[in-house]
Image (spheres, rainbow, N blue to C red):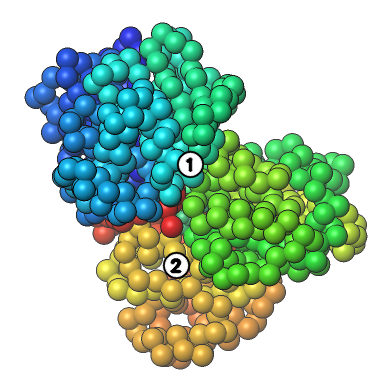
């Protein structure tokens, strides 16, 4: 939520800042702003997207070699110009950008008001800006110390960058709970919410830790202290990200590109981990924790949104293959419901961004109770990756489209590998069965590529036929139940059509009342597990004149005779079907959203990483 970019060095800051904002726009896009320091400190901001900011500043003097910029996802105050960042302090000598929520801002604001401060916005950020100014003036401290002292008074989450007219060579950056990366160039510094705006300039980065404040000065070494004034040595890491991964590469949208990347991203998730020739699975990041997992009374999976759906597939996998009991929890519920957690529990946190606030809080809670925490994250160096005891990266590459696609299939791939590894250690599968699954998994990237081709024509026809409906139902059973949930989520988030996912057998306990000739029902009806039962559910829908769109195994004849539309996917093992069946559902949502004129990569009200509660 919210994208932050800042620059100080010999180059002109504006082009770096505006390009950086474009790369971070997936994090929030309801308003955008920029502050540049030359002979004065100038803030320009506007409601709407970064392109609107570009338009807004086209006639102003944009010179300056130091600046900060922000693209916002509103938390406090509606998305309008006044609430957009950067925020000036009362004297207009300080400007600040912020990602996060200052929970005690109301109290701080009241105190500042009694000292004569007035406010131009309804944001928590403007309160922090004035608090810093107040401390700087009254305690006669440097800007760095004023920021540090102010942050000691703040309750909540923040990633901030501060710039001041009095300090034309200095940026102050700090974080707690929201990510911030500092790029170290030859003679300049870059700051951003993630590494994507930095990678084209430098690969040397420092990830700030919680409660750290960085003093970033032109022609000086980077200095870091904690908010309690303890010196820290900056730990410089090398970025491994590839610049082309951040481009659309000829596709109309990032989402489409990411859907088509899945044969490769799934392969990357398995690389060096799946050794079919040896009959082994090795996951370096969890190897030390395998005895813990084997001894665990249960695994608790915590996640949100699409990652939670991957977690549900994980539940089926761990129980089915390795016979380990699993509970899958919405992180947002888990953190507040006083759950029973023991030292023998293993918690797996799943997150694409590695920054989701609820998932992070669930991790902290489980950690405080002594549980072992493993992470499955896509973003290297992210907060969740660092907060966990161990875990594995999905290696799906940067996912820019707000709707998660390749991250989901990579998460499911990793969970499959983990479950298989545990199954081999526990001996819960015969060697023959284990090897069959390993071989089938190895073939999945190829089969995803086939699915993309096989489903192309029909998915497009189905999208054209149903693009104007108001409701959709998605039904599946067993491993395909989470697929139904994920299909429905994909459709609603990017096309704004109301969609529900259900276990197919639950239909008769309520949703069946919705079925009439206008209701499209997507069945995931592949040929294993409860296939016969799902066939009966299809008949129940047809008997009520519902329109059936069925995802079936290639060559299916039974469902073909009943459904209105058939989308075929290649044959595979039952537990691997989610990796294939999800693909046409992603494409269906994509086409419907495009046909409805929706902004596919940046759907309304959403942001890619949800760093607030
Ligand atoms: O980054 P995370 O995986 O932790 O994000 C969790 C959800 O916010 C995310 O999956 C969200 O539901 C996506 N927009 C779904 O496409």
Query: Given contact means CB atoms under 8 Å apart, are the residues at marks 1 and 2 in contact?
Result: no
- Location of residue 402 with respect to 20 vertically, above or below: below
Instruction: Determine if residue 315 is in view.
Output: yes
Residue 42 at x, y = what percent? 17, 26
Quadrant for residue 386, please give it. Answer: top right
Quadrant for residue 141, please give it. Answer: top left
Most foreground residue, 609 or 560: 609
Seen at 41% across and 44% down, the residue is 153
- Location of residue 298 with respect to 90 vertically, above or below: below
- Location of residue 448 with respect to 275 vertically, above or below: below
Left or right: where does residue 374 sit relative to residue 65?
Answer: right
Most foreground residue, 610 or 344: 344
Mark 1, other Cα within 10 Å: few <14 / some 14–19 / many ≥20: many
Residue 252 at x, y = what percent? 34, 41
Mark 2, other Cα within 10 Å: few <14 / some 14–19 / many ≥20: many
Left or right: where does residue 380 sit relative to residue 11?
Answer: right
Disc 1 or 2, which lies upstream in sequence? 1
For label 1, the residue is 176
Most foreground residue, 44 or 435: 44
For label 2, the residue is 488
Most foreground residue, 519 or 311: 311
Seen at 55% across and 80% down, the residue is 504
Residue furthest to the left in view is 59
Instruction: Determine if residue 256 is in view.
Output: no
Alpha-carbon span between mark 1 and mark 2? 34 Å
The yes-or-no answer for disc 1 within 8 Å of ligand 1 is no
The secondary element bearing badge 1 is classed as strand
């Amino acid at each position: 939520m919210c994208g932050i970019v800042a620059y100080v060095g010999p180059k002109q800051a504006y082009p770096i800042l505006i390009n950086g904002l474009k790369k971070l726009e997936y994090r929030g896009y309801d308003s955008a702003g920029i502050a540049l320091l030359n002979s004065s400190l100038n803030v320009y901001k506007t409601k709407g997207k970064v392109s609107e900011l570009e338009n807004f500043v086209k006639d102003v003097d944009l010179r300056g070699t130091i600046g900060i910029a922000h693209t916002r996802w509103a938390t406090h105050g509606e998305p309008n110009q006044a609430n957009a960042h950067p925020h000036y302090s009362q004297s207009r000598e300080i400007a600040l950008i912020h990602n996060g929520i200052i929970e005690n801002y109301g109290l701080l604001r009241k105190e500042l008001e009694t000292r004569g401060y007035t406010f131009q916005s309804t944001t928590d950020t403007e309160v922090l800006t004035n608090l810093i100014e107040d401390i700087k003036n009254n305690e006669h401290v440097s800007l760095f110390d004023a920021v540090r002292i102010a942050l000691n008074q703040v309750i909540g989450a923040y990633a901030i960058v501060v710039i001041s007219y009095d300090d034309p060579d200095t940026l102050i950056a700090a974080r707690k709970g929201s990510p911030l990366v500092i790029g170290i160039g030859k003679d300049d510094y870059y700051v951003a919410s993630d590494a994507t705006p930095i990678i084209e300039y430098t690969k040397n980065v420092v990830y700030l830790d919680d409660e750290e404040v960085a003093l970033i000065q032109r022609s000086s070494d980077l200095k870091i202290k904690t908010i309690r004034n303890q010196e820290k040595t900056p730990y410089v890491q090398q970025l491994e990200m590839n610049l082309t991964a951040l481009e659309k590469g000829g596709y109309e949208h990032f989402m489409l590109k990411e859907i088509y990347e899945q044969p490769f991203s799934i392969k990357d998730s398995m690389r060096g981990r799946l050794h079919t020739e040896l009959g082994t699975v090795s996951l370096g990041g969890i190897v030390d924790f395998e005895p813990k997992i084997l001894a665990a009374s249960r695994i608790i999976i915590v996640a949100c949104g699409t990652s939670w759906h991957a977690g549900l597939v994980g539940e089926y996998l761990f129980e089915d293959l390795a016979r380990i009991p699993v509970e899958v929890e919405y992180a947002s519920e888990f953190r507040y419901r006083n759950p029973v957690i023991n030292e023998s529990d293993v918690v797996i946190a799943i997150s694409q961004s590695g920054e989701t606030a609820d998932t992070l809080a669930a991790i902290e809670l489980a950690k405080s109770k002594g549980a072992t925490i493993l992470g499955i994250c896509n973003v290297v160096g992210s907060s969740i990756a660092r907060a966990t005891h161990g875990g594995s990266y999905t290696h799906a590459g940067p996912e820019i489209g707000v709707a998660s696609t390749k991250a989901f299939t990579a998460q499911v791939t990793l969970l499959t590998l983990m479950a298989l590894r545990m199954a081999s250690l526990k001996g819960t599968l015969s060697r023959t069965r284990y090897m069959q699954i390993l071989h089938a998994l190895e073939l999945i990237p190829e089969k995803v590529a086939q699915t993309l081709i096989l489903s192309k024509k029909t998915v497009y026809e189905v999208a054209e036929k149903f693009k104007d409906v108001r409701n959709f139902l998605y039904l599946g059973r067993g491993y395909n139940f989470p697929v139904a949930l994920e299909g429905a989520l994909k459709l609603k988030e990017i096309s704004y059509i109301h969609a529900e996912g259900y276990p197919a057998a639950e239909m008769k306990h309520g949703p069946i009342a919705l079925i009439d000739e206008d209701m499209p029902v997507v069945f995931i009806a592949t040929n294993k597990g409860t296939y016969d039962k799902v066939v009966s559910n299809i008949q129940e829908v047809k008997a009520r004149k519902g329109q059936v769109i069925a995802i079936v195994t290639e060559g299916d004849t039974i469902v073909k005779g009943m459904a209105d539309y058939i989308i075929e996917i290649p044959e595979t093992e039952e537990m691997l079907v989610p990796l294939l069946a999800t693909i046409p559902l992603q494409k269906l949502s994509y086409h419907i959203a495009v046909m409805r004129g929706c902004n596919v990569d940046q759907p309304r009200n959403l942001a890619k990483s949800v760093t607030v509660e």
